[in-house]
Amino acid sequence: MDYTIDKIRSIDAKFEAQKISFSPLLFQAVRALLDFGILKAVSDAGEEGLTRSDAAQKTGVSPYGAGVLLEAAMAAHIVILKPDPGEERFVLGKTGYFLLEDDLTRANFNFVNDICYKGAFELGESIRSGKPRGLTVFGGKWDTIYQALSSLPEKEKKSWFDFDNFYSDIGFPEALPIVFAEKPKKILDIGGNNAKWAISCCRYDPDVEVIIADLPGQTSLAEKNAAAAGFTGRIKAVPCDALDKGDLFPPGADAVWMSQFLDCFSPEEITGILEKIKKSSGENTDVFVFEPLWDKQRFEAAVFSLLATSLYFTCMANDNSKMYRYGELVTAIEKAGFTLSKAHHNIGMHDYSLLHFRRNP
């Protein structure tokens, strides 16, 4: 993928500009098609397709409403128009299939709808002020979304965690053998929120103990999930603010793990977090960073999704972090006195990178 050359034809570029101009309306049209069950009804009709009248009758939406939604979907290739001597019929297109059936697309769509959509209107103000102004749509006076997570409505909370966990969890089976190559007995999981990695570790190795360091709202959730999985004695959660220099991480870990955690901070904050890790770790402590790096992706759709996610960080999360490229992240970590020992790229179907660092003497 070469982003240094503008290869697109002018006529295609103009079309792309129109897509961007109308994208908020199209997004809401897709939301309505999904919520009303119209897209599902079109899918169920198979190759025969569905007329506007059929869609209205099956879903309780007016023929007018069904018609404008289906025509907008047709323009976006979500449904395909099938000429008919009587009334035109609509058949599910490939894009419609992914919107309806693909888990990745569903996680992204629900995350944008439930977490980002309303707050995105404040993106410009967030950049001007240096604060995530979009976060005000959830009420309260939080500085970051991480402080707000435990207070979000259940639907929004579920969409956030589904998005946060969807990508990294798939890569855990490939990451576990790498992390356990040196047989660590105690792992410090920084930012472990719902304990999924900690639980995976305990299932992988019957002797390992995991300490989760996270904000108080997340540690209570981690403890609940660890108990439900039967690992109360082997998984401990310690409330800790990664940005508070006086709030040190628990010492004595053989390995430190951070999964999709450092992208929540600015480069300067990343360096500060690693300096705290260095204070609490030993000379032989392994530090593992598990991140989706946008310049290590195999597919352009993945690059697009990651860079668009950076806008969420701007208006909703904290207004100082983003999805990083490989060199940016490594530089921020090495400034704290660590050296990259080995980099494993393209882990899992979502092309995560597992970066292994050792502290400098």
Image (cartoon, grey):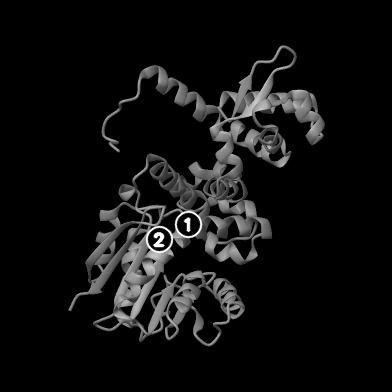
Where is residue 131? Give x, y as percent. Answer: 49, 53
Please determine whether, in this image, residue 308 is positioned above or below residue 48: below
Q: Which mark is residue 265?
A: 2
**Farthest front residue?**
47
Dot 2, crowdedness within 10 Å: few (<14), some or many (≥20)? many
Where is residue 324? Give x, y as percent. Answer: 34, 53
What amino acid does circle 2 point to?
Phe
Quarter occupied by residue 168: bottom left
Q: Are marks 1 and 2 in contact (CB under 8 Å)?
A: yes
What amino acid does circle 1 point to?
Asn
Seen at 80% across and 28% down, the residue is 62
Find the distance from the CA under tag 1 to the CA under tag 2. Answer: 8 Å
Seen at 70% across and 32% down, the residue is 45
Please determine whether, in this image, residue 232 is positioned above or below residue 321: below
Quadrant holding the C terminus: bottom left
Quadrant holding the N terminus: top left
Going from N to C along the chain, the mark reached first, 1 or 2, is 2
Is disc 2 placed on a helix, strand or loop?
Answer: loop
Q: Which residue is mark 1?
A: 318
Seen at 40% across and 60% down, the residue is 265
Is disc 1 placed on a helix, strand or loop?
Answer: loop
Q: Which mark is residue 14?
A: none
Q: Is residue 170 visible?
A: yes
Please determine whether, in this image, residue 311 is positioned above or below residue 257: above
Please determine whether, in this image, residue 158 is positioned above or below residue 30: below
